[in-house]
Image (cartoon, helix red, strand yellow):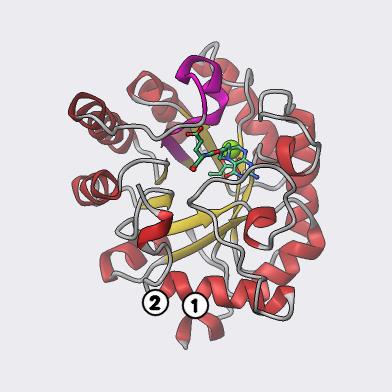
Amino acid sequence: MAYLQDGKPIRLGDFARMAAKGEKIASLTCYDSSFAALLDRSGVELFLVGDSMGNVLQGHGSTLPVTLEQVEYHTASVLRGTRRAMVMADLPFGSYQESREQAFRSAARLMAAGAHMVKIEGGAWLAETVRFLVERGIPVCAHIGLTPQSVNTLGGYRVQGARPEGAARLEADAKALEEAGAALCVIEMVPAALGAAITAACPRMPTIGIGAGPDCAGQILVLHDMIGVYPGRTARFTKDFLAGAGSIDAAIAAYVAAVKEGRFPAPEHCY
Ligand SMILES: Nc1nc(=O)c2c([nH]1)NC[C@@H]1CN(c3ccc(C(=O)N[C@@H](CCC(=O)O)C(=O)O)cc3)CN21
Ligand SMILES: CC(C)C(=O)C(=O)O
Ligand SMILES: [Mg+2]
């Protein structure tokens, strides 16, 4: 299939073109050079150097202890293994919430480490920060729904936007972030119908779902969850693709194919 054979580097505009054509975007977290090379040759188009490294690499119970220095280090490592995929890096907790100037300073460090784009957790309150970064040359992926850096105010890792008021607020957040210039938007742990509604409402900002249903423009999972090596509690939106696949290469290829063909997520992974 074309998506596995096309070796040209992915560019930012490719995601909007894919979304418009209905070609699903396959994304995974990635933290090191060896996995970057493996994921890249298996057709994963978008890597996230996620602050989930706090959980899966460091053994913490949340993403809050992860530092900007750590994300820089892993971003530089991932870049050395990447040829085709776009690499985005999470702005960690405490590196952007203070001001748009603080956000720019932190994002500039991730871009200097090699990131092609940064990801930032929050709703409409972040729109002016998104615009500030985009105007200054930094592509931004928004992240709404369950925002794990806010686990202490959300009261746990639970589904967001399940009631009408919450759903309306998340849709308004998405529209504000699209208007501010966000190039992509991760939507985490919301009802599948809300993932579909936000995707339809924001045609200029392709959505990347994790526990947000099959109608998002793309899907993302934490690498360690989808190869079954994370020893902690995993959410129902994850799937172990290594079980029955025989090799890590085959597991990644199975994930890419399942996303591209609309077979993942299945109803049992949705809310
Ligand atoms: N390994 C890993 N995978 C992730 O998906 C992930 C991280 N780490 N770290 C950052 C956040 C935290 N996330 C989480 C963590 C736990 C649940 C979870 O346990 N969900 C349960 C219900 C929990 C409850 O209601 O008490 C579920 O069934 O989905 C969900 C998302 C998602 N992100
Ligand atoms: C779960 C994804 C979206 C993330 O932000 C991370 O891995 O840090
Ligand atoms: Mg994250």
The numbered mark at residue 257 is 1
Q: Is residue 253 above or below residue 177?
A: below
**Please, what secondary structure does the residue beneath circle 1 have?**
helix
Q: Are marks 2 and 1 in contact (CB under 8 Å)?
A: yes
Q: Which residue is mark 2?
A: 261
Residue nearest the viewer, comparing 194 with 124: 194
**Which quarter of the frame holds ligand 2?**
top right
Q: Is residue 61 left or right of residue 261?
A: right
Looking at the picture, how far across and down is residue 154, in whole percent? 46, 20
Question: Is 228 above or below relative to 247?
Answer: above
Q: Amino acid at mark 2?
A: Glu
Q: Residues within 10 Å of mark 1 (few under 14, many from 20)?
A: many
Ligand 2 within 8 Å of disc 1? The answer is no
Q: Is residue 257 magenta?
A: no
Q: Where is residue 255, by image quadrant?
A: bottom right
Three-letter code, disc 1 = Ala
Q: Residue at x 61, y 69 (%)?
A: 241
Ligand 2 is within 8 Å of the C-beta of the residue at disc 2: no
How many other residues sit within 10 Å of disc 2, few (<14), some (14-19) or many (≥20)? few
